[in-house]
Amino acid sequence: MDSYRSFVMNWFEKVWNQGDVSTLDCFMTDQTVFHGSDGVDLVGFEAFRASQDRMRQFFSHFRCLVLNTTVEAAVLCSTVRIKAKHRATGKRVQFQAMNRVLFDSSGKIQEAWDTIDWMSCLIQLNVIPPDFLTRCLQRSAP
């Protein structure tokens, strides 16, 4: 179980914080499936690299900090704090993500689900107002 925790800590440090995609084959295979918050599934190295490149087009100074992990059998769940700087505005943002990772028999990521708090990020960037959700729910109330 500690090996899965170490694995995830290394994943965020090397792949996200350092941006070292040359290490991807240590963590995943070309059949690894990532299920994102946007409803899009990414399969394999090229799809993951392209997604990470898009993220880095919008954000610099990317920093992920694993806040906690829970492991049961070959499944790990983690909460991650993400800090970054929005390239277009120069604003620093901080938001959280929750991840669920299923490991294959070789100890690599077989499948992963990511839920990212984009609403918090968009509020910090003044893209949507802080009371956006409340106003939407009030409009839909009977």
Image: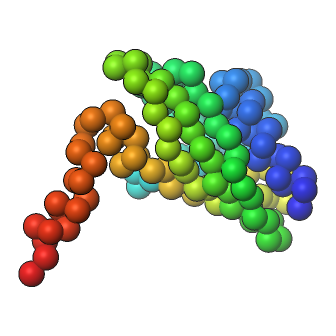
Task: Say whether residue 141 is left or right of residue 97.
Answer: left
Of residues 59 and 38, the one drawn nearer to the viewer in this rendering: 59
At horizontal 74% and vertical 39% (from top left) the residue drawn is 11
Give the quarter of the image for residue 48: top right
Image spot of residue 27 (x, y percent): 77, 41
Image spot of residue 29 (x, y percent): 73, 44
Of residues 87 and 34, the one drawn nearer to the viewer in this rendering: 87
Q: Classify 104 as above or below 137.
A: above
The reply to whether residue 120 is visible in this rendering is: yes
Give the quarter of the image for residue 113: bottom right
Image spot of residue 124 (x, y percent): 36, 37
Of residues 139 and 32, the one drawn nearer to the viewer in this rendering: 139
Quadrant the C terminus occupies: bottom left
Image spot of residue 138 (x, y percent): 14, 69
Q: Classify 28 as above or below 33.
A: above
Task: Say whether residue 34 is left or right of residue 10.
Answer: left
Quadrant the N terminus occupies: bottom right
Quick one: which residue is furthest to the right in this view?
A: 2
Quick one: which residue is furthest to the front in this view?
A: 131
At horizontal 40% and vertical 18% (from top left) the residue drawn is 90
Q: Classify 20 as above or below 30.
A: above
At horizontal 13% and vertical 76% (from top left) the residue drawn is 141
Q: Classify 132 as above or below 25.
A: below
- Please name the colour scheme applied to the rendered image: rainbow
Q: How many marks?
A: 0
Of residues 24 and 73, the one drawn nearer to the viewer in this rendering: 73
At horizontal 74% and vertical 58% (from top left) the residue drawn is 69
Task: Say whether residue 37 is left or right of residue 81.
Answer: left
Give the quarter of the image for residue 87: top left
The reply to whether residue 101 is visible in this rendering is: no
